[in-house]
Image (cartoon, rainbow, N blue to C red):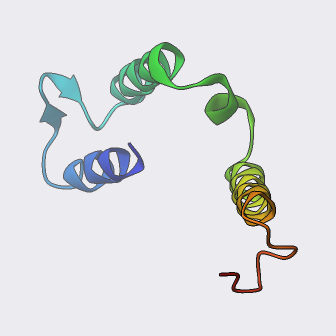
Amino acid sequence: MLAGVLYMMLRSRTESHFLGVSLRTNAGWQRLYAALEQIIDAGFPENLRTQALADLERIKATDILTEADNEAKSSGCIDRSLKCA
């Protein structure tokens, strides 16, 4: 989505409209931003709308490590960093 917004910003340097929307007026950009907000509200999970990316990445890393620890323990290993047979 970010790439699309950046594309539109660059395109506004050479074109005045895109699909009938003015790229050189505040009204045109408000229309584009409103469309983006509708897409986000309709399709993005709550955590992607409310949490910072760094927090989501930290949570994901913690979940991955916890899963690796659980797999190691279930296979009889004490520590995931050790290679167990």
Q: Residue furthest right?
A: 78
Q: Where 76 sits versus 62, above or below?
A: below
35 vs 69, nearest the viewer: 69
Give the residue at x 30% y 45%. 4
**In the rendered image, which quarter contains the C terminus?**
bottom right
Q: Tell how many labels.
A: 0
Left or right: where 66 falls relative to 17: right
Q: Horizontally, is 79 left or right of 85 in the view?
A: right
Q: Nearer the viewer, residue 61 or 84?
A: 84
Image location of residue 79, percent across then percent down = 84, 76
Q: Quadrant of residue 29?
A: top left
Percent position (x, y) of residue 73?
A: 81, 62
Residue 23 horizontal side relative to residue 54, left or right: left
Q: Residue at x 72, y 55 (%)?
A: 67
* Residue 35 sits above or below residue 55 on the image: above
**Image location (x, y in percent) of residue 55:** 78, 51
Instruction: Name the residue rendered at 53%, 16% in the picture.
Output: 41
Figure check: 63 above or below 34: below
The quadrant holding residue 84 is bottom right
User: Which image quarter holds the N terminus?
Assistant: top left
| Above or below, comparing residue 34 to residue 78 in the picture | above
